[in-house]
Image (cartoon, rainbow, N blue to C red):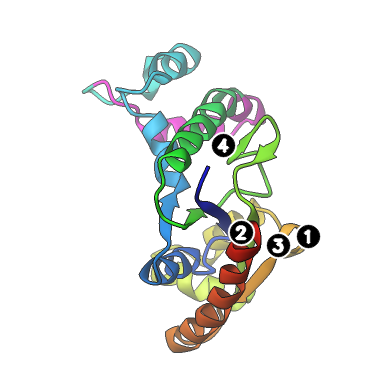
Amino acid sequence: MRTFCVGLTGGIGVGKSTVANMFQTLGASVIDVDAVGHSVLDRSSSEYLDILETFDEKILNPDGTINRTALGKIVFSSEGQLAKLEAITHPAINKRLLSMLEKQTAKLTILDMAVLVEQPLAQISGVPLYQKVIVVEATYQRRIERLQLRGLEEEEAHARMQSQATDEERRRVADLIISNDNSLEDLQLEIMSCWETVFDWMNDWT
């Protein structure tokens, strides 16, 4: 693998994708791990029949595609059902990520991934595909405000935040922490400072 890979993570509402976009404007290649996960559910994927066999036709739309909302209601109401889905999807996601990274020509690749601490994603045989981890943080109130702007009620936003890893759990794996509590201009300045650190990482790696 010739690209230096950084796992970029953070809880819902911290502005992680905004940070990823800023790194992209500086020349990094960005892989949206959520989008890779969605591709595993596509009708054309090799995992489609396994998912269908496990969860039955009740998860299908009339056109035969998987209804993610229907599937979500099943798996998020039962840890056992969620474990069944993850046993199919996670190895498939990891395999796709490895293939994508092997084809990368950019010197730096960012894995934009909400789930890094909670599950062994972006790993092959327990070994991470990324060399470093950047965690994006924001205060509880700022996150609630951003999620409400997306149309979520405060109770729902809080529930989603509670279902994810804590700030303390993310900090334990972080090589670098980005605070995103203020303006976009402030964030841009912090990204520029972080870029120097990432550049040093790449130099040490090569």
Q: Is residue 113 among the parts visible in the rendering?
A: no
Give x and y (percent) for residue 167: 71, 64
Give the Cα distance between marks 4 and 1: 26 Å
Give x and y (percent) for residue 133: 64, 58
Q: Secondary structure at mark 2?
A: helix
Tag 1 and tag 2, C-beta contact below 8 Å: no
Foreground tag (1 vs 2): 1
Q: Nearer the viewer, residue 6 or 201?
A: 201
Q: Is residue 171 above or below residue 187?
A: above
* Quadrant of the image occupied by residue 103: top left
Tag 1 and tag 3, C-beta contact below 8 Å: yes
Task: Count neighbours of disc 2 (C-alpha within 10 A) and say few if under 14, some if 14 to 19, many if 20 or more.
Answer: some
Tag 3 and tag 4, C-beta contact below 8 Å: no
Foreground tag (4 vs 1): 1
Q: Amino acid at mark 3?
A: Ala
Considering only order in the chain, which callout, 1 or 4, is on the residue closer to the N terminus?
4
Task: Count neighbours of disc 4 (C-alpha within 10 A) and say few if under 14, some if 14 to 19, many if 20 or more.
Answer: few
Q: Secondary structure at mark 1?
A: helix
Q: Which residue is tagged 1?
A: 172
Give the Cα distance between marks 3 and 4: 27 Å
Give x and y (percent) for residue 26: 40, 72
Give the Cα distance between marks 4 and 2: 14 Å
As drawn, the label of residue 112 is none
Magenta segment, which residues? 64-83
Give the Cα distance between marks 1 and 2: 18 Å
